[in-house]
């Protein structure tokens, strides 16, 4: 396994390849994200909710939750199984493993988000420490079937060995992702000056922006998967091999 931070930039290419190898699933998730974002606007209109950025954000978050809860994790576990290399997630069993693990992985992600949010409210730095130390928990639960405590310990071990590599590679990913989002928002903003709920529901440019935004979210998740596979703990390094499921 490579140990050079610069070579971990290849995880951006590998993440892109994960999407290219499953084009139907990739386009399907992007289209679903586009439709769910439109659903948020429709709910806002039907419920007569005020045009408020907080309302927009809350409805969009709730509408897009199925992507983070189910569809993106399902894509990731399938991509990991097809890439091979770990007996805890093999091609012929990933569907069964996913059904056993996806909800636990979601709760792990929710706890991570809560801990990070609390930490960020305490002068930011503690939240970054929590994210860096335990950021791999959801993937370890999803892909390797670990318990929450096993995943937390495994994440700490990974970051203890490879924190420089992770920071370097994730910074590059974030730069690409945020640059694309900024450009996308700017281009949409040139044509759409007042994105009310009705505009968000009927403006084709908004739909296209939501499609691209969902695609970029999946791309970022796929790149993180590629990086995870590069720096994860080898079976047996942490003691005992965790049981699948």
Image (tube, rainbow, N blue to C red):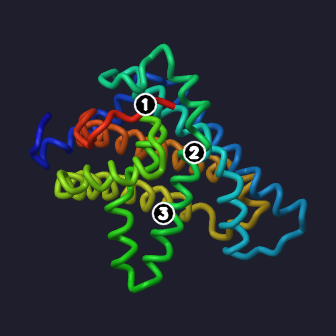
Is disc 3 surrounded by few (<14), some (14 to 19) or many (20+) residues within 10 Å? few
Q: Disc 3 or disc 1, which is closer to the eye?
A: 1
Residue beneath label 2, please?
Answer: 104
What residue is at 43 percent from the left and 43 percent from the top? 139
Q: Under tag 3, what secondary structure?
A: helix
Which quadrant, please, contains the N terminus? top left
- Label 3 close to label 1 by CB (< 8 Å): no
Q: Disc 2 or disc 1, which is closer to the eye?
A: 2
**Foreground residue, 167 or 146?**
146
- Taking 13 as reference, is 95 above or below it? above
Residue extending furthest toward the front: 240
Q: Under tag 2, what secondary structure?
A: helix
Residue beneath label 3, please?
Answer: 186
Is disc 2 surrounded by few (<14), some (14 to 19) or many (20+) residues within 10 Å? some
Residue extending furthest toward the left: 4
- Label 2 close to label 3 by CB (< 8 Å): no
What is the C-alpha distance between the residues marked 3 and 1? 25 Å
- The answer to whether residue 168 is left or right of residue 222 is left
Q: Answer with mark 3 or mark 1, whichever residue precedes in sequence.
A: 1
What residue is at 58 percent from the left and 23 percent from the top? 96
Is disc 1 surrounded by few (<14), some (14 to 19) or many (20+) residues within 10 Å? many
What is the C-alpha distance between the residues marked 2 and 3? 37 Å
**Foreground residue, 214 or 132?**
132
What residue is at 20 percent from the left and 44 percent from the top? 9
Q: Answer with mark 2 or mark 3, whichever residue precedes in sequence.
A: 2
**Foreground residue, 69 or 60?**
69
Residue beneath label 1, please?
Answer: 19
Q: Under tag 1, what secondary structure?
A: helix
- Label 2 close to label 1 by CB (< 8 Å): no
What residue is at 51 percent from the left and 31 percent from the top? 245
């Amino acid at each position: 396994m490579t140990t050079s931070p610069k070579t971990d930039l290849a995880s951006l290419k590998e993440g892109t390849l994960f999407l290219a190898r499953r084009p139907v699933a990739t386009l399907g998730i992007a289209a679903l994200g586009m439709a769910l974002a439109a659903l948020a606007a429709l709910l806002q209109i039907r419920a007569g909710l005020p045009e408020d950025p907080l309302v927009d954000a809350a409805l969009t978050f709730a509408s897009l939750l199925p992507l983070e809860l189910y569809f993106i994790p399902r894509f990731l576990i399938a991509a990991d199984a097809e890439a091979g290399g770990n007996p805890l997630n093999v091609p012929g069993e990933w569907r069964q493993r996913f059904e056993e693990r996806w909800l636990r992985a979601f709760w792990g992600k929710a706890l991570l988000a809560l801990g990070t949010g609390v930490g960020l409210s305490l002068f930011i730095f503690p939240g970054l420490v929590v994210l860096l130390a335990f950021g791999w928990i959801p993937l370890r639960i999803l892909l390797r079937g670990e318990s929450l405590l096993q995943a937390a310990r495994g994440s700490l071990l990974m970051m203890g060995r490879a924190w420089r590599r992770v920071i370097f590679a994730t910074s590059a990913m974030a730069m690409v992702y945020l640059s694309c989002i900024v450009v996308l928002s700017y281009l949409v903003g040139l044509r759409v000056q007042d994105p009310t709920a009705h505009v968000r529901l009927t403006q084709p440019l908004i739909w296209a922006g939501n499609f691209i935004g969902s695609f970029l979210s999946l791309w970022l998740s796929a790149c993180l998967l590629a990086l995870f596979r590069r720096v994860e703990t080898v079976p047996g390094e942490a003691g005992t091999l965790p049981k699948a499921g």
